[in-house]
Amino acid sequence: MKRIFSFITFICATQCVLAQSLPTELQTPEIVSVNRMPMRAESFAYENRMLAEKRVKEDSRYFLSLNGDWKFNWVQNPNQKPKDFYKTDFDDSNWKNFPVPANWELNGYGLPIYVNHPYEFAGKRLQGAKLNAPFDIPEDNNPVGSYRKEIVLPENWDGRQVFIHLGAVKSAFFIWINGVKVGYSEDSKLAAEFDITEFVKPGKNLVALQVYRWSDGSYLECQDMWRISGIERDVYLYSTPKLDLRDFKIQSNLINNYEDGKLQVDVEINSYKKDLKTLHSKPDTFLLDMQLVDASNKEIYSESAREA
């Protein structure tokens, strides 16, 4: 009886370990990101007005695309995901090359699911039982894709702030740079950006991602659509000066009985200079210029604001 009891105890303990195999972030609605930059208006900081008018960020010397082949590993059961894959000395020579951006299920990894109701991950295990939303996430059938890519940081980025932009990753992911965990993100149809300045170094660097097909965020992304996953939009690095126009809000309204227009522009300026954190530092003085031009690039209005 003692042996039987010990065996049962071992099974229960094993099941408890497996039940806790999913990261806490995937099952905690209060956590939608860790260390992710705040959402902002879509924009790119070009080095001059000529490039800005063309609006082709790929032409900027401060843009580096990470699209293309990444080293890739896929597992159906998250308990089988590779360990220490994010370390710089990890051997990924036996991993497949996988395109980014691309969906797993359209490239031979897992099944695309088209459903409106119920949730695509309910499965036989939960049929007939009410889901405990948003906490019921598959523990042993939740595909995980692990990605690795080596990149070379441009020499002219030295002394600048460096960010990584991930246009859409479904459903949730963790990111490491050079073996150090940087953060976490859900909100799979919104761009996720991370400040990676302190994690990168001149020359060769390693970017690693681990993506889960389902998370608590999947409960908010339930629509009559194909359920597919992976890195679905562009991934790139970009760099900015230490003093940067990070975000803006533009409102244009009609006034005076619709005869005139009112333009209001609010901007957010970020300073990444470390000495500004000291008690005796002096904030930067800067000049902000704004021009409003028409379709023929003729200036209609301009204004300058100085911040001291």
Image (cartoon, helix red, strand yellow):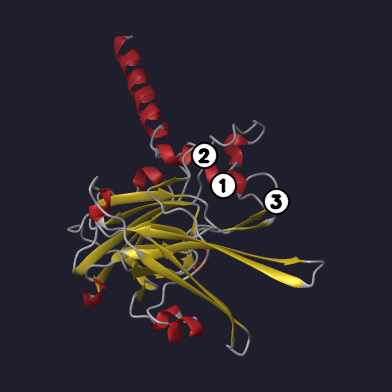
Mark 1–mark 2 Cα distance, whole angstroms, equals 9 Å
How far is disc 3 from disc 2 in space, using C-alphas?
A: 18 Å
Q: Which residue lies furthest to the bottom in this view?
A: 296
Tell me if label 3 and label 2 are in contact, CB under 8 Å. no
Amino acid under disc 1: Ser
Residue type at numbered disc 2: Ile
Q: Residue at x 24, y 56 (%)?
A: 198
The reply to whether the C-beta atoms of the residues labelled 1 and 2 are less than 8 Å apart is yes
State the image coordinates of residue 285 (x, y, percent, origin top left): 34, 63
Q: Give the foreground label among 1 and 3.
A: 1
Of labels 1 and 3, earlier in sequence is: 3
Q: Which residue is drawn at 48% across and 44% down?
A: 32
What element does badge 2 sit on? loop
Q: Which secondary structure, mark 3? A: loop
In front of the other: 88 or 111: 88
In the rendered image, which residue does mark 1 sit on? 218
Residue that mark 3 sits on: 116
Q: Mark 2 points at which residue?
A: 137
Mark 1 lies on a secondary structure that is: helix
Instruction: In this rendered view, identify the residue nearer to me: 201 or 290.
Output: 290
Label 3 sits on what residue type?
Asn
Can the viewer see residue 75 in this picture?
Answer: no
Q: Which of the two residues, 169 or 203, is positioned nearer the viewer here?
A: 203
Q: Residue at x 31, y 51 (%)?
A: 182
Indicate the quadrant containing the N terminus: top left, top right, bottom left or bottom right.
top left
Determine if residue 12 is in view: yes
